[in-house]
Amino acid sequence: MNEQYGTETKIKVAWGDMDAMGHVNNVTFIKYLENARVEYLEKVQLINEDRITKIGPILLQITCRYFKPTVYPDNINIKSNVTKVGNTSIVMQHEAFSEKLGKVASGESVVVLYDPLKNEKCTIPEEFKLAIAKIEGK
């Protein structure tokens, strides 16, 4: 990932985020990445309030690799970039940094632009590609 990030999402680790092993649960980390992804997509105005009739992003795939167990109390900073813009999809890279431990996880999200009225994926409009390029400094 480059020095510039599209978004940086701050997350405070809650006591309830931990599992029986005493560290942040893997499902919770996926939720953290979801928060980062949504924040980025809101920044480029790809998410709108009318999710019933307007095109918008849907998650096709998400992966997460864990490097260090994270525990309460802590704060996580997730840095996100779009690494690829295709015809109908966007690939996002996420890196999660703990204030205490440094890099604790990384992940990738693949998002498809979806038309709910046609029930099918659709082409990403040029305006969104330009907004992403601007955020990414390209």
Image (tube, helix red, strand yellow):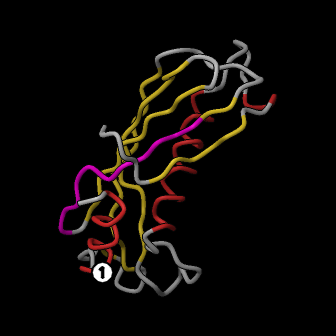
State the image quarter where residue 56 is shown.
bottom left
Give above or below for 56 relative to 22. below
Query: How busy is the neighbourhood of tag 1: few (under 14 within 10 Å), some, or many (20 plus)?
Result: few
Q: On the rendered structure, is 77 left or right of 40?
A: right
Q: On the rendered structure, is 121 left or right of 27?
A: left
Instruction: Pick the quarter of the image with the N terminus.
Output: top left
**Is residue 52 visible to the viewer in this orientation of the structure?**
yes
State the image quarter where residue 118 is shown.
bottom left
Magenta stretch prevailing secondary structure: strand
Residue 85: give x, y in percent of width and height: 23, 60
Indicate yes or no whether the magenta region holds residue 83: yes
Give above or below for 83 relative to 103. below
Residue flagged by tag 1: what amino acid is it? Glu
Residue 35: give x, y in percent of width and height: 58, 51
Indicate yes or no whether the magenta region holds residue 38: no
Residue 103: give x, y in percent of width and height: 48, 23
Q: Which residues are magenta?
A: 77-87
Viewer-proximal residue among 41 and 136: 136
Residue under pointer 1: 127
At a point 70% along the width and 19% down the height, the residue shown is 71
**Is residue 121 visible to the viewer in this orientation of the structure?**
no
- Secondary-structure class at tag 1: helix
Instruction: Pick the quarter of the image with the C terminus.
Output: bottom left
Single out the residue that lies furthest toward the right: 15
At a point 36% along the width and 58% down the height, the residue shown is 111
Residue 30: give x, y in percent of width and height: 54, 39
Give above or below for 93 relative to 116. above
